[in-house]
Amino acid sequence: MSVRLGEITWEAVAAIATLAAVLAALFPIWRDARRRKAHAKSLRIRLCSKLTLLRPSLHRVVQGGHTNHPAAVLTKEEFGEAVRSIAAMMRESSVLEPEEQDRLGMAFANLEMTAGLYDTCELTADSANNVLALIDEAVSVMEKYGLLHGPVQAPWENAGKERSSRAG
């Protein structure tokens, strides 16, 4: 197929100009969609980090005051601050998928109530276990929609592989 410039009509020029105008109009929409997706991914990782930070403290309650990681257990003030931090991030939750918003909302509502009871005898092991289950559900749903752009291996796993490959 060959195109000769002498055969290009004003209709062809108008069609090309219309296509260019449509592409120019769609570019900001595409850019905003990419920005929203990146914002959602960033929010997911920040929320999951805070939710994970609360887990050892709630596990301590479930285990009757015993824990494998005592340095990871938060004080009442630190626990409350982590929950307030999640509350601040919840303002951005409109970028998340509806399923994520639902699970996160349930976990957050229970965390707010738990923060008031944390480090008191009124927070029972069953209640802490239920909150842990809600955290797990929220994190699982956020993982489903994507936390990171690629897989991440824990540094301690890589160190073990490097040592074993050097020894061999």
Image: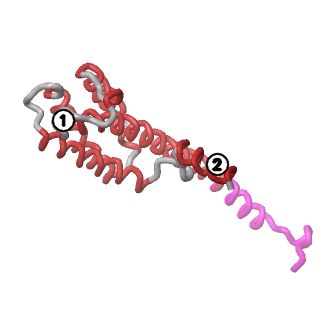
Disc marking residue 102: none
According to the picture, the residue beneath numbered tag 2 turns out to be 162
State the residue lying farthest toward the bottom.
Answer: 1
Three-letter code, disc 2: Glu
Kindly identify the residue that appears in the image at 64 percent across and 48 percent down: 162
Residue nearest the viewer, comparing 53 with 72: 72
Residue at 27% across, 26% down: 79
Amino acid bearing label 1: Val
| Labels 2 & 1 near each other (Cβ < 8 A) | no
Element carrying mark 2: helix
Which stretch appears magenta? 1-22
- Mark 2 vs 1, N-terminal side: 1
Local crowd at mark 2 within 10 Å, few (<14), some, or many (≥20)?
A: few
Q: Residue furthest top?
A: 77
Horizontally, is 61 left or right of 135 in the view?
Answer: left
Mark drawn on residue 61: 1
Left or right: residue 117 versus residue 106 is left
Label 1: how many residues lie within 10 Å, few (<14), some (14-19) or many (20+)? many
